[in-house]
Image (cartoon, helix red, strand yellow):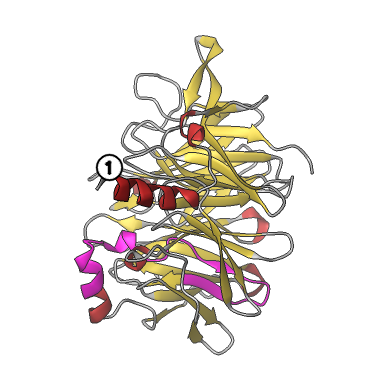
Amino acid sequence: MKNIIAKYLIIALSGISIPVHAQYEFFSPPGAFAIEVSLSNTDQKRLPMYRNAISSLKVIGDNIIGGTTASEGLSPFIFVASISRQELIDTLDINKIVPGQKSVQSGFCKWKDNILIAGTIPLDKGDGHLIRIEIDAENKIKSKDLGTPVPGEGIFSLTSNTRDNMLFGISFPSGFFFSYDLESGKSHIYKDISPKENELEQLRQFALDPGSYLSRSLIIDNNGLVYGSMPVNKLFCFNQANESFKILDYALPDVWGRSALGQVDSWAKSDDHRLYGGNAGDGQLFVLDTEKMKVKNLGKPAMMPRLRGLTFGRDGKLYGITGALPGYTHLFSYSEEDGFHDFGNPEFPMKILGIEAGILWRGFQIGTIASSEDGKYIVMGEDEALSQLLIFTVEAK
């Protein structure tokens, strides 16, 4: 029996090229730093505990704009921090704009004049809202409620086609696809890709909730087509021109017997317009050929599930976050030339009032990642009870 177990262990590990020691390494590059945005026992401007899990990130110029998820019964925040000043600048309690919300996890869509749009998920069975966010000349947050695109539903994921002033999203928990015209404020709801009863039955066998099978991320290619995932383990494409859906013949990469766990966790578009995606179920990176509508599995960056975020640096490499509870998340990079590199856990110095020498802050649970507009900075946000920002510089290519 021992020989049989050993044999299967060798087979399982033979397909993994990630060194085991990376599981215990810390990543501390020169010039990296952490920004304290969350702390309870201070009179400094900070996000309170249990309301600061960073679930959305965007970088515009020197500003890092974030959205959080709150613990049960509490409301989330929008915040802005400065890269150059390495400090939190302003915060806005979402409850002051839209009462009864618990999360901003849709990500931020950039519209005209650096206006950002995000979506909320409500407490209990309320309505999720689209919110408009601007950072003024004094780095203060201005926000406006744009209303509810899908009554009775939250907003799980968003993407935008700025050329046509259109938003596209997935509702929560039903998984309806919707479009929203930013100029007219009109929305249209499509039920084509929401899970059917036979699919829900299959998902229930795995005890999966909507957060574990709806598309956590959407992306638009250069032709204006919208891509995302749908149950069970499928990719879809939406054509705005004729309002049609196409289910791709090629599914998300999966491990035998675990296809129900297939879910797009993240997307990123390269400079040559290729679409890279992460499958949550088994933490695999893939690239989608939008001409052939074919998926190529690029493998696993680490021996963990989830691929929670993807972004490109100015060196041309793809950076991402893999892993989730009960394990630790890891930072990794990927390029065709070098393949995967697992950096382990980020450990960056954080200078705070009274401790100017700085302390080392380790990012064990990271939920979001974004790059600056020039790709110079990679910004990561934790999603714990006490979450901070971690930033490092990417060398030029």
| Quarter where residue 384 is shown | top left
Number of disc labels: 1
Q: Is residue 130 magenta?
A: no
- In the displayed image of the protein, which residue is found farthest to the right? 397
Foreground of the two, 314 or 340: 340
Q: On screen, 5 above or below 286?
A: above
Foreground of the two, 386 or 363: 363
**Residue 209 in the image, given as x and y percentages of width and height:** 26, 61
Residue drawn at (70%, 38%), measured in percent from left and top?
Answer: 394
In the rendered view, does 265 fall on the left or right side of 194?
right
Residue drawn at (70%, 66%), measured in percent from left and top?
Answer: 273
- Residue designated by label 1: 71
| Residue 296 in view of the camera | yes
Q: On screen, 335 above or below 390?
A: below
**Residue 262 in the image, given as x and y percentages of width and height:** 39, 65
| Quarter where residue 87 is shown | top right
Q: Which residues are magenta?
A: 201-228
**Residue 229 in the image, given as x and y percentages of width and height:** 44, 70
Badge 1 element: loop
Q: On screen, 34 above or below 166?
A: above
Q: Is residue 204 magenta?
A: yes
In the rendered view, does 83 fall on the left or right side of 44?
right
Foreground of the two, 119 or 194: 194
Give amino acid for label 1.
Ser
